[in-house]
Image (cartoon, rainbow, N blue to C red):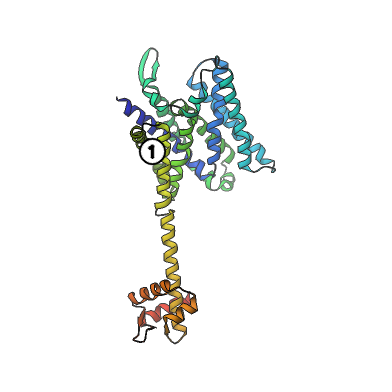
Amino acid sequence: MSSELVVIITGVLVGASCALVGCFLVLRRMALLGDAISHSVLLGIVGVFFFTGGRSALLMVLGAGAVGLLTVSLVELINRTGRVREDAAIGLVFPALFSLGVIFVSRFPSRVHLDVEHVLYGEIAYAPFYRFELFGLDLGYRSFWMLGIMAALDLLFVGLFYKELKLATFDPGLAAAIGFSPVVIHYGLMAAVSATTVVAFDSVGAILVVAMLIVPPSTAYLLTDRLTTMFALAVGTGAASAVGGYWLARSIDGSIAGAMATVAGLLFVAAFLLSPLHGLVARLLRLRHLRRVFARGLLLSHLEGHHGSADLATLRCRFLWNARTAAAVTRGAVRDGLVRETTSGAYTLTEQGRGAARDVAAG
């Protein structure tokens, strides 16, 4: 397998695993908490290296998961005091834990075989050089095994607890009333986020993990109102970001992880502008249509209440329309057969227009 394909598949696996749990972070309005966990787990990774001197994947996941849950617990504890809002609590907790991790990395390099640049930025281009060996057997690329298993576990977690996660996300009160524990589900989700983050750390670094956790799910959120479709779109967006980001990085000779995050951001901007449901362009078109409908209703009501006739100057004065608006409204009404223009330049209602005017008056 070529190095290019290994890097692309690694990026696709990161996008898929992060998107699955990231959807719930976006829906719960906890995107910043995902950022906090993805940084604070550094302390757990460093702690495993510091105390064991090894690179056990299982211990790394457990250590990072423990610190991730510690982050969530401290945020909840501070938030419950009522003196600090949740966003401020997150801003207090994760820089402290992340800073401790950075201090350990930079202060004890002989005990912790990591460096700050590797942890923060990662280097997905090195994925083809790391192999997974078990009992002396070369089983292939380590990133495929680690990220593939993590993506499968995330998919299994979401599949098994889909009903509970959905209910606790959209109506935690009802979830508690029928016997589900929103707190347990919340911490289970945070544990999944922590595990996903640390597994992706070694291959791509925290920056791309944060991007893949939040940006593809946010993009999908703009494109659909169905949760299952949101999962599919988020995973697809993550995969597209990985593929497009690799070729962008190759064309500009830049950072692969940075290019993947950039492409993810560009896809979000495209969805933000062009989404048929929640896009800015669609919203502007809907507002424009509503303004036209409202203006036409005013025209028809005015003509119905003033003996069915009025000239353009009267309409402009009555509704404070400029010449362009007045011409557009009357021209559209004439085109649709609701109004006709007389030889004197006045506008009168047709039979169809009178019926439409009565509909407007009826509400």
Residue 191: image location, x then y, percent? 53, 32
Residue 145: image location, x then y, percent? 39, 25
Relative height, residue 337 to residue 236 (above, below): below
- View extreme (left): residue: 1
> On the rendered structure, is 341 left or right of 54?
left
Question: Quick one: SS at disc 1?
Answer: helix
Q: How many marks?
A: 1
Residue 196: image location, x then y, percent? 48, 31
- Residue at the spot 60% in from the left edge and 31% down from the top edge: 70
- Residue at the spot 36% in from the left edge and 19% down from the top edge: 139
In this figure, which residue is indicated by the disc labeled 1?
A: 241
Q: Quadrant of residue 96?
A: top right
- Residue at the spot 43% in from the left edge and 37% down from the top edge: 261
> What amino acid is labelled 1 in the image?
Ser
Residue 158, visible in the rendered structure = no
Relative height, residue 56 to residue 319 (above, below): above
